Amino acid sequence: MYVVVVFLEAHVGRQTELRDALRRHGKLSIEREEGCRRYDVSVDPIEGSAFLLYQVYEDEAAYRAHRELPHYADFRLLSDPWVKSRRVLTYESVAILGGP
């Protein structure tokens, strides 16, 4: 499995729009992409503008395909103006234990 961790910071006053867009995008990714196994969206309860995405893909090719799909392009076009900063980290999974 291929794991992607994304740290996002929303511009002041754009937290709600970004949160809602992230939830919709995660749902679409799970529904439309066979290779997307997990897409978690979390927000810092103290600093409400800081978001963490935890994504699991079948492999690196599935993640690369995710970034080429129309719903990804639509999401970026919509949400990029609300994002103050973004950091993306990728990992090869050693073990994924448990579930939701």
Image: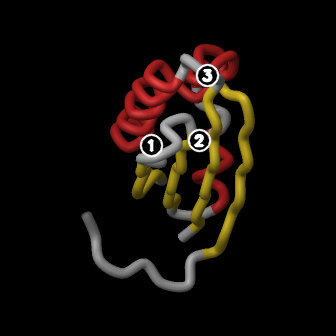
Marker disc for residue 66 = 2
- Residue at 49%, 37% in the rendered image: 48
Percent position of residue 84, x then y: 72, 29
Q: How is the image coloured?
A: secondary structure
Residue contact between numbered discs 1 and 2, judged by CB atoms under 8 Å: yes
**Residue 37 relative to residue 82: left or right:** left
Percent position of residue 96, x then y: 43, 78
Q: Which three-letter amino acid code belongs to the residue tagged 3?
A: Val
Q: Residues within 10 Å of mark 3 (few under 14, many from 20)?
A: few
Q: Nearer the viewer, residue 53 or 68?
A: 53
Percent position of residue 24, x then y: 39, 28
Q: Nearer the viewer, mark 2 or mark 3?
A: 3
Using the image, determine if residue 73 lies above or below residue 66. above
Question: What is the secondary structure assignment of the residue under circle 3?
Answer: loop
Using the image, determine if residue 88 lies above or below residue 29. below
Using the image, determine if residue 77 lies above or below residue 84. above
- Residue at 74%, 36% in the rendered image: 85
Q: Residues within 10 Å of mark 2 (few under 14, many from 20)?
A: many
Q: CA distance from mark 2 to mark 3?
A: 28 Å
Q: Nearer the viewer, residue 72 or 88?
A: 88
Which residue is tagged 3? 12
- Residue at 69%, 62% in the rendered image: 90
Mark 1 or mark 3: name the one nearer the start of the chain: 3
Q: Which three-letter amino acid code belongs to the residue tagged 1?
A: Glu
Marker disc for residue 33 = 1
